[in-house]
Amino acid sequence: MPRFLIPLLLVGGLVGPLFGLNWYSYDTEWDQHEQTFEEETRRIATTLANGVSGPVWNLIPEAGRAIVRSLMQDPRILRIEITTDQEKIFLEEGAPKPLSPPMQSVVIRRQGMPIGKATIYFSNGLLRQAQDEIWNFHFSIAVVQLAFAVLIAGFVLRLNTRLETARHRE
């Protein structure tokens, strides 16, 4: 049996399951983070739709501008569009229409009837930053796991060498 086979198998046996668990943990944490982001954006869009139903119903854009400007203070929000049921812009605020950011659209209803649509475009920069932080954390854990596995393998190799040396002396 080659001298380095046992430590190599030991490193693989120690690191393989740990990396697998670490990856699973990362994937689960990221899924939860995405789900939380989706729930938050849905809640914000629903709040906006409820807050502007009166102004849209009465066709008074200025009455809805306060809630739109208030929501625009959230750094995750890039743009807000309120459209009528004829798809005409009723109220808009923020940056020019982004190409493909995350967005939420909610139908604005008054007395159960659809009267328009509230669309919020969100920045994915904070989402990407969170993903990077999660990845860096789990990558650091993987590096520490690998370092410990190499140290253990080195210890086993050294112990094995000493045992073989002692056996040859006998």
Image (cartoon, rainbow, N blue to C red):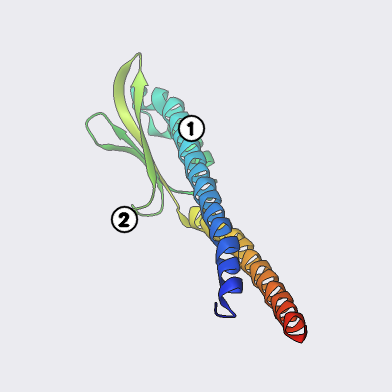
Q: Quadrant of the C terminus?
A: bottom right
Report whether 55 appears left or right of 44: left
Q: Inspect the image, locate mark 1, and give the three-letter code of the amino acid beneath it.
A: Arg
Which residue is depicted at the point 30% across and 24% down? 115
Q: Residues within 10 Å of mark 1 (few under 14, many from 20)?
A: some
**Horizontal and vertical percent for residue 112?**
33, 15
Q: Is residue 81 left or right of residue 147?
A: left
Check disc 2 and report its element: helix, strand or loop. Answer: loop
> How far from the left and from the top, in percent, is residue 63?
45, 30
Task: Give the farthest residue toward the left.
Answer: 86
Q: Quadrant of residue 98?
A: bottom left
Q: Nearer the viewer, residue 149 or 138?
A: 149
Q: Residue at x 30, y 35 (%)?
A: 83
Residue at 59% x, 72% y: name it: 6
Please state the horizontal and vertical placement of residue 151, each as a whole percent of the image: 69, 72
Q: CA distance from mark 1 to mark 2?
A: 23 Å
Which mark is drawn over residue 43? 1
Which numbered tag is attached to residue 99? 2
Q: Nearer the viewer, residue 41 or 98?
A: 41
Instruction: Please identify the quadrant where the N terminus is shown.
Output: bottom right
Q: Residues within 10 Å of mark 2 (few under 14, many from 20)?
A: few
Which residue appears at 36% of the width and 18% of the height?
Answer: 110
Q: Residue furthest front?
A: 170
Answer with the quarter of the image where residue 46 lies: top left
Quick one: 44 or 3, which is closer to the camera? 3
Question: Is any part of residue 149 visible from this angle?
Answer: yes
Amino acid on which the number 2 mark rests in the picture: Leu
Q: Earlier in the sequence, mark 1 or mark 2?
A: 1
Which image quadrant is residue 113 in?
top left
Q: Position of residue 40 (x, y in %)?
A: 50, 37
Q: Which element carries disc 1, helix, strand or loop? A: helix
